[in-house]
Amino acid sequence: MSSTMSALFDECQLRCLAALLDTLIPPDDFPGAWDAGVGDYLQRQLQGDLADLGSSYHDFLRCLDAAARHLHKRDFADLALDARSELLHKVENHQITASWMLEPGKFFPKIVEHCGEGYYSDPGNGGNREGIAWQMIGFEVRG
């Protein structure tokens, strides 16, 4: 974990973010989102073009952890993949009744979009470490 990422998020938020990203794109024969560099991509974006979304990310991660503790008595990162997926499905479908600092069902699609961008984008943008996602889909860089 880079020192910049640690400056953007506290340890609990980083654990939650890594689990969130790996729930969206879990590891299989290829790395999940976190190991493929999506966290690095987000770090760059949250210090640049997406800087205005930093507080929304903080709020979302705090509330997601709170919802996990309320429903499962554990932090989001400590839940099994199926429990994390179920909780995110509830967030996506506006089924979480706890008080959130932002509208989770409206912000969650942005996170999904950013995760996909980081996973499949040019490795020069910080994600898609070593072009692993491109290898997965058979994309070859030519020239």
Image (spheres, helix red, strand yellow):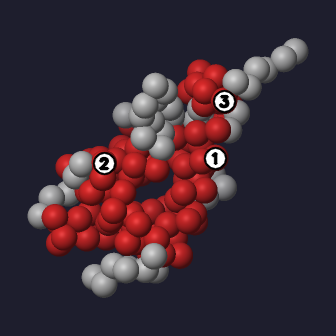
* Label 2 to label 3: alpha-carbon separation: 23 Å
Determine which residue is flagged by label 3.
Answer: 137
Please state if 81 lies on the left or on the right of 113 as rendered. Answer: left
Tag 1: amino acid: Glu
Task: Reply above or below: 15 against 139.
Answer: below
At 46% from the left edge and 25% from the top edge, which residue is drawn? 29
Q: Quadrant of residue 132?
A: top right
73 and 129: which one is in front? 73
Q: Residue furthest left?
A: 73
- Which part of the image, by quadrant, shows the N terminus? top left
* Residue 71 percent coordinates (x, y): 19, 70
Mark 1 residue element: helix
Q: How many marks?
A: 3
Q: Mark 3 or mark 1, which has the lower sequence index?
A: 1
Q: CA distance from mark 3 to mark 1?
A: 15 Å
Decide which of tag 2 and tag 3 comes sooner along the chain: 2
Dividing the picture into quadrants, the one containing residue 44 is top right
The residue drawn where x is 46% and y is 71% is 92
SS label for mark 2: helix
Inspect the image, locate mark 3, and give the three-letter code of the amino acid beneath it. Answer: Ile
Residue assigned mark 1? 117
Q: Which residue is mark 2?
A: 81
Q: In the image as oriented, which residue stretches furthest toward the top?
A: 143
Q: Is residue 104 above or below residue 142?
A: below
Quote the CA–CA distance across marks 1 and 2.
22 Å
In this rendering, the answer to whether 117 lies above or below 58 is above
